[in-house]
Image (cartoon, helix red, strand yellow):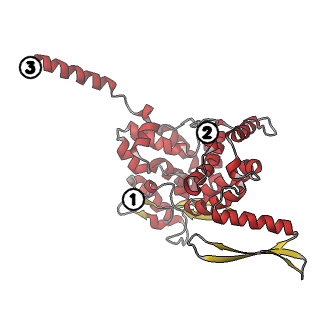
Amino acid sequence: MSVYKDEKNSTWYVMVRYDNWKGERKQKCKRGFSTKKEAQMWERSFLLQTSADMEMMFEDFVEIYTRDMKSRLKETTWLTKENIINTKILPYFGKRKINEIQTKDVIAWQNEMIRFRDEKGKPYSATYLKTLHNQLSAIFNHAVRFYDLTSNPACKAGNMGTEQRKEMLFWTKDEYLRFSEAMMDKPVSYYAFEVLYWCGLRMGELLALTPSDFDFDKQTVTVSKSYQRLHGEDVITSPKTKKSNRTVKMPPFLCDEIKEYIDMLYDISPDERIFPITKNYLHREMDRGAKETGVKRIRIHDLRHSHVSLLIEMGFSAVAIADRVGHESIEITYRYAHLFPSKQKEMAEKLEFERNDENVS
């Protein structure tokens, strides 16, 4: 027997022996159960998790999934996944045995998500529905790949929703210059938007910049980190992808501007953020500038699109642009294909020349 009563405080506890993942014999003690049944249920759940027995409850496997995956992901990524799991998935599947969940159960869950309406009568977007399903499927896939679950019922059910790319907006150079004039009354705003537009940085990359990131002799800025606001605290993380770690060459005028700006900052340390503002601040400033100048309101991230579109207009290749903004070249080609000048006419003319040249010879 491994369940005992603590006579001193009239609660129950479990003392259980098990083999860990190294095959070592271990002992686990868990106290504070109000009834013997609760203690026995916890013991069964613990032993099923330890042996990775697919008879376990779905919520118990989620604990395994969390232990396996949380340390491998950026904190912001995990928080998003965790919220979806806790609010959209566990309430429906948590108390079911993972090996007894069938395709029809997933379809029923999908239909419930599709039927959902908030207090304003608004449903989940197609993109969000797809994200919900992908997370559920990821949990089942983890069980199939590493813990011998027979199959993934979410995969059999098929996805719901579709990924909808947000409309890509951008400013022309003239539109940006009009906007930037309205920012000149606030140096922190003006210089922040200058870096976003002329270097194509992501907002988190901008907000993480410190004086030590700039080399004014070489006229470069090094992107090696990103700023996030988590749990009410400033958090510096690694950039979005490995490709995001890069050194960006600044135009000379911007180099002079940022040097001037940093010199304005009183007693700033080399590793102190030069833009100690928030994303909400930049959004408000974008609203203000667009309203004052009459240029169309775009998202902060659209300044990055604006930078790419400007480089395309200037004739730079997808490979060169990708290297500057921290993307793969194939992604630049795919996302901005409509902006690159068409080569179809030139191709047809050269093919015509090749054919005629062959006939002549």
Q: Which mark is residue 156?
A: 2
Q: Is 136 situated left or right of 340 in this image?
A: right
- Quadrant (top left/top right/bottom left/bottom right) for the N terminus: bottom right
Residue 24 in the image: above or below residue 77 = below
- Above or below residue 228? Residue 9 is below
Q: Residue furthest front?
A: 1
> Residue 13 lies in what quarter of the image?
bottom right
Q: Which one is earlier in the sequence, the residue at label 1 or at label 2?
A: 2
> In 3D space, how far apart are the residues under numbered discs 2 and 3 (Cα atoms)?
60 Å
Q: Residue at x 72, y 52 (%)?
A: 97
Q: Position of residue 319 (x, y in %)?
A: 36, 45
| Image quadrant in which the C terminus is located | top left
Near-viewer residue (172 or 95): 95
Q: Residues within 10 Å of mark 3 (few under 14, many from 20)?
A: few
The amino acid type of the residue labelled 3 equals Ser
Foreground: disc 1 or disc 2: 2
The residue that label 1 is drawn on is 220
Q: Residue at x 43, y 60 (%)?
A: 222
Q: Is residue 87 visible?
A: yes
Identify which amino acid the numbered label 2 is placed on: Lys
Does residue 159 show up? Answer: no
What secondary structure is marked by label 3? loop
**Residue 31, quarter of the rendered image:** bottom right
- State the image coordinates of residue 110 (x, y, percent, origin top left): 70, 38
